[in-house]
Amino acid sequence: MEYSTNKEGDSTAIFLKGRLTFADHEKFRKLLAEIGTQGTKNLVIDLKALEAIDSVGLGLLMIARDDTEERKGRFALRSPQGEVKRIFAISKAEALFTIQ
């Protein structure tokens, strides 16, 4: 997993690239902790460049959603493509998130 972030006011966008899998769970959790300490209220995770996701990756997105909601913020996923979009449909995960 590679990522970049863009923070504007109390909102942050995370742009994920590559794969989001079990191997990335520590890195992703550290990223969420860092964002939480920076005063981020609202979070958008852009999935356009994400090529693959497994069940742990879906769980990590749910953790990000829950953390954001605990801060009374808005959470959304943006632009899932290809295999990632297919996994969301098969797993019914699309019903668990706001997807832009």
Image (cartoon, rainbow, N blue to C red):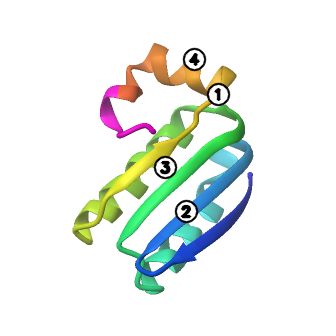
Q: CA distance from mark 2 to mark 1?
A: 17 Å
Q: Earlier in the sequence, mark 1 or mark 3?
A: 3
Residue at the top extreme, as displayed:
90
Q: CA distance from mark 4 to mark 1?
A: 8 Å
On the rendered structure, is 61 left or right of 72? right
On the rendered structure, is 69 left or right of 3? left
Q: Earlier in the sequence, mark 3 or mark 4?
A: 3
Residue 23 lies, in percent from the top left, at: 69, 49
Q: Earlier in the sequence, mark 3 or mark 2?
A: 2
Residue 54 lies, in percent from the top left, at: 59, 32
Q: CA distance from mark 3 to mark 4?
A: 18 Å
Mark 2 neighbour density, 10 Å: few (under 14) some (14–19) many (20 or more): many
- Residue 21 in view of the camera: no
The magenta region covers 95-100
Mark 4 neighbour density, 10 Å: few (under 14) some (14–19) many (20 or more): some
Q: Amino acid at mark 1?
A: Gln
For residue 70: magenta? no
Q: Which residue is mark 1?
A: 81
Q: Which residue is mark 2?
A: 13
Q: Which residue is mark 3?
A: 60
Q: Residue at x 49, y 38 (%)?
A: 58
Q: Which residue is mark 4?
A: 86
Q: Residue 21, located in which quarter of the rendered image? A: top right
Q: CA distance from mark 1 to mark 3?
A: 18 Å
Q: Residue at x 56, y 75 (%)?
A: 7
Q: Residue at x 35, y 40 (%)?
A: 98
**Nearer the camera: disc 4 or disc 1:** 1
Q: Is label 3 in contact with label 2 (beta carbons under 8 Å)? A: no
For residue 99: magenta? yes
